[in-house]
Image (tube, coloured by chain):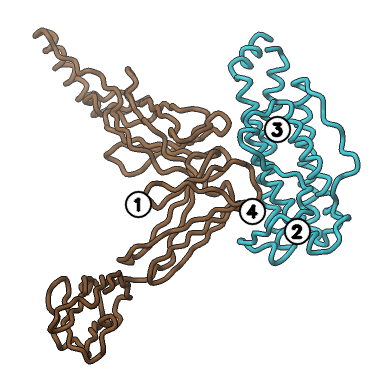
């Protein structure tokens, strides 16, 4: 008797023959060891209608009355593969790029992928990541190429085959990783300043020859509007218009000077600008003096608000 | 580091800026010119194999390690030679373009490209490097191409190569600029007053 795997398409009707047994022979079918109702038989053949995943099982056919196993198959129900999604990107230009692929809908049965990458007519080697990652890495080797690259991924399973091809220029897939270690610090004695530092993404191999430029965005948490500043040839910046006393969120993105697209935004850094320590009166005299000063200022502001410095709590001091 | 390094740095920066300007100019020239060539040359996915005839157009492509380890003189000389070839080819196109407006754009681009070549020569002399020998008889002009389709194929690859060379040059000049630290340059300037 034979034992093998049988793949069938979802929602189809299936007829399982009991090996070489005659049509009118007396048999019993089981699914994972459970007897199947005679109503599903057509002679010695088993009829399965509009199959779905619930039909996945080990089907066995026994001749009656000898109970000899005459046929056995594992049924797996699934789909042929649809067109895979394929994308290539270089976050380590100009040394390498990678291509990754996925299926938009499951097939429920094993698939195998084959990827090929060419530059013009030259075939390039694509180092596959370990299973199950659908990704492979390609060394540029040559740079400043004019010919386009073409990547093709073919997916095959027992029920069918499909493929996707993309063509691209060397430069168009360049997208660095976000900058790393973004840190923001208050600047002592400057209530509206924040110093931000960051590092080139670690996978970017040649910052000397292929420098990155950066986009920095920041805002106080209490506001929605971001402020932006573009920076070159630096991995630090001092924000000079921070809102005093308020926590700020800061992010940075990176891009090659000439080519490709901006990275995603970095992990956010948070910081609150420097604040003056509130004065704690130590003697009664100082307490009295502070109270009268406060009163005088309050009455004065009523009449001449422009010329008098309002005595705010340290957190809302307006910067020069 | 003697005085010429400050001159060299400024000259390199100016040449870098010129490549960026030319890149911008090429972007606005390439579309109309490919449309002038017509299908399939103006189709986004047109990806022809590089037939041997077009290989005489200098290719910017090179092994990355080799490029990184180019010495400054060779790096500049390759730029100088490539643009001299490309300009020569471009000028041979210029005369054959029927559309006046396109001819004007091509003409303008040729002048800018000539400016870039002069600028590269300026960098080389400020660093004390001899210029490569002038082109003998230009290796390739449009006149020598047998049929119209191959002429257009040449033009197609020429525009592509120009794009690649301008990107490569930008990286070349960034690399050259980094070799002459700005700090030293500023200090030298200060001493002069």
Q: Earlier in the sequence, mark 4 or mark 1?
A: 4
Horizontal and vertical percent position of residue A71 = 24, 76
* Element class at badge 3: helix
Q: Colour of chain B?
A: cyan
Q: Nearer the viewer, residue A274 or B142?
A: B142
Question: Where does label 4 land, which residue?
Answer: A120
Mark drawn on residue B15: 3
Compute the Cα span from label 3 to label 2: 30 Å
Question: Where does label 2 land, which residue?
Answer: B153
* Element class at badge 4: loop
**Which of the two discs, 3 and 2, sits closer to the camera?**
2
Q: Colour of chain A?
A: brown
Q: Earlier in the sequence, mark 3 or mark 2?
A: 3
- The number of numbered discs placed on residues in the rendered structure image is 4
The reply to the same-chain question for discs 3 and 2 is: yes
The reply to the same-chain question for discs 2 and 4 is: no
């Amino acid at each position: 008797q034979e034992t093998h795997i049988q793949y069938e398409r979802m929602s189809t009707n299936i007829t399982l023959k009991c090996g070489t047994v005659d049509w009118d022979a007396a048999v019993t079918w089981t699914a994972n060891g459970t007897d199947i109702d005679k109503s599903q038989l057509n002679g010695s053949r088993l009829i399965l209608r509009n199959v779905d995943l619930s039909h996945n099982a080990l089907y066995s056919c026994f001749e009656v009355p000898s109970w000899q196993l005459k046929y056995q198959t594992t049924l797996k129900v699934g789909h042929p593969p649809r067109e895979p999604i394929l994308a290539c990107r270089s976050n380590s230009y100009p040394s390498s790029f990678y291509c990754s692929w996925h299926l938009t809908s499951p097939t429920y049965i094993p698939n195998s992928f084959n990827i090929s990458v060419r530059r013009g007519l030259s075939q390039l080697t694509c180092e596959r990541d370990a299973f199950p990652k659908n990704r492979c890495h390609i060394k540029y080797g040559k740079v400043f190429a004019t010919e386009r690259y073409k990547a093709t991924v073919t997916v095959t399973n027992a029920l069918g085959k499909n493929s996707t091809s993309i063509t691209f220029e060397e430069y168009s897939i360049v997208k660095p990783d976000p900058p790393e270690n973004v840190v923001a610090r208050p600047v002592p004695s400057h209530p509206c300043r924040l110093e931000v530092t960051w590092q080139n993404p670690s996978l970017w191999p040649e910052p000397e020859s292929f420098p990155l430029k950066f986009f920095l965005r920041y805002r106080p948490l209490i506001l929605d509007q971001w402020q932006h500043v573009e920076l070159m040839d630096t991995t630090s910046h001092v924000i000079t218009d921070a809102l005093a006393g308020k926590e700020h969120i800061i992010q940075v993105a990176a891009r090659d000077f000439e080519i490709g697209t901006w990275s995603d935004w970095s992990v956010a850094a948070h910081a609150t600008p420097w604040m003056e320590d509130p004065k704690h009166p130590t003697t009664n005299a100082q307490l009295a003096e502070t109270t009268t000063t406060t009163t005088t200022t309050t009455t004065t502001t009523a009449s001449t608000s422009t010329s008098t410095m309002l005595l705010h709590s340290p957190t809302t001091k307006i910067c020069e | 580091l003697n005085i010429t390094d400050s001159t060299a740095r400024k000259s390199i920066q100016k040449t870098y800026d010129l490549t960026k300007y030319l890149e911008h100019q090429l972007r606005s020239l390439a579309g109309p010119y490919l449309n002038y060539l017509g299908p399939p040359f103006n189709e986004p996915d047109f990806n022809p194999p590089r037939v041997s005839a077009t290989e005489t157009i200098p290719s910017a492509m090179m092994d990355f390690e080799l490029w990184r380890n180019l010495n400054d003189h060779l790096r500049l000389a390759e730029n100088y030679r490539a643009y001299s070839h490309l300009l020569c080819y471009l000028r041979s196109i210029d005369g054959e373009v029927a559309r006046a407006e396109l001819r004007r754009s091509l003409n303008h681009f040729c002048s800018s490209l000539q400016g870039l070549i002069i600028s590269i020569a300026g960098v080389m002399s400020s660093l004390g490097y001899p210029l490569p020998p002038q082109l003998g008889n230009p290796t390739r002009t449009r006149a020598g191409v047998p049929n119209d389709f191959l002429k257009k194929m040449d033009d197609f690859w020429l525009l592509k190569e120009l794009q690649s060379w301008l990107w490569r040059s930008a990286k070349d000049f960034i690399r050259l600029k980094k070799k002459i630290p700005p700090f030293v340059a500023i200090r030298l300037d200060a001493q002069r007053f």
